[in-house]
Image (tube, grey):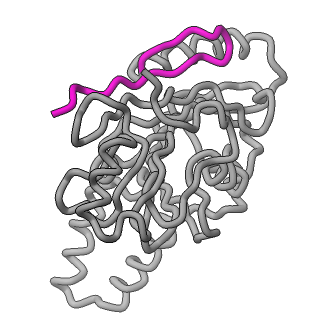
Amino acid sequence: MQNKIKSEGKCLFCGKIYSKSGINRHLAAHLKEKAAKGVPGKSFLVKVEPDKSLVPYPYFLCMWIDGETCMNTIDGFLRDIWLECCGHESEFEDLTKTADNNISNFLNQLILEERFEELLEIIISIKMKKKVSMSDEAKDVFQKGRILDYHYDFEDTTTLVITVMEEYPVKADSEIVLLSRNEPLDIMCCDCEKIPATLICTSETHLGKTLFCPQCAEKHSKTCKDFDDHAARAVFNSPRSGKCQYVGGMIDKERDGVYKM
């Protein structure tokens, strides 16, 4: 069994390396200094990571987003750095707006009173509130503490969790500033557990052993009839690795590869 995977990223401002658990506090200190002398406006420190229940690896992005940036632009950035493969559809969902537990009690009361038309109207209304329009600006969606889900590809879905860590009364330096991204993770071969994994077998995910170094991948290909034909996928520094036809991102190519020992 592989030891706990280390996740850390480099700060855009000072170049120092910090752990995933500490990088946002560090970045917030830099942004607080910039806020003291920036152009008035609104901007946000945002953390993005995959849904842990679906992707077990600690990928992360830290971004400084200007308040006038459209959600469509954020969608495009996430596609370009982590996700885009075949032009699939995507959506943002605002989880904060549906977090009120009192709503379920109210709906149950309507059911007991058989007020089904009202019930349907409220359900439709709740569903509409969950969706975030791609034309909305960040300042109308984000606020400190808000959490959103982002889904890319509704068949072989990759789900990201977006958390607004801080907000600032100044404009960002550009629409989206990538402040930090996890360095390639030290994910090792499932077979030898000694060499970084470079290939994924998408045919045998149910067996648990799906990540291979070049040497073990060659051995695996002799027992897996699908591997050389269509099941082999390259490993990238992205939660989209191994899905659909994903072949890597177009932003920050320097960190898009695999871990080097």
Q: Pick the quarter of the image with the C terminus.
A: top left
Q: Residue at x 42, y 54 (%)?
A: 95
In the image, residue 10 lies in the stretch drawn in magenta: yes
Q: Residue at x 77, y 39 (%)?
A: 175
Q: Can residue 147 be seen in the rendering of this structure?
A: yes
Q: Based on the displayed image, in which of its 4 quarters is residue 201 positioned? A: bottom left
In the image, residue 168 lies in the stretch drawn in magenta: no
Q: Outermost residue toward the right?
A: 39
Q: Residue at x 63, y 25 (%)?
A: 179
Residue 245 at x, y percent in the picture: 53, 65
Part of the protein shown in magenta: 1-19
Q: Main secondary structure of the magenta part?
A: loop
Q: Can residue 148 be seen in the rendering of this structure?
A: no
Who is closer to the viewer here, 205 or 158?
Answer: 205
Residue 101 at x, y percent in the picture: 26, 56
Q: Residue at x 66, y 25 (%)?
A: 168
Who is closer to the viewer here, 89 or 207?
Answer: 207
Say whether residue 101 is left or right of residue 239. Answer: left
Say whether residue 93 is left or right of residue 27. Answer: left
Who is closer to the viewer here, 224 or 254?
Answer: 224
Q: Pick the quarter of the image with the N terminus.
A: top left
Residue 242 at x, y percent in the picture: 43, 57
Vertical side of 23 occupied by 136: above or below: below
Say whether residue 102 is left or right of residue 261. Answer: left
Vertical side of 97 occupied by 154: above or below: below
Residue 192 at x, y percent in the picture: 23, 36
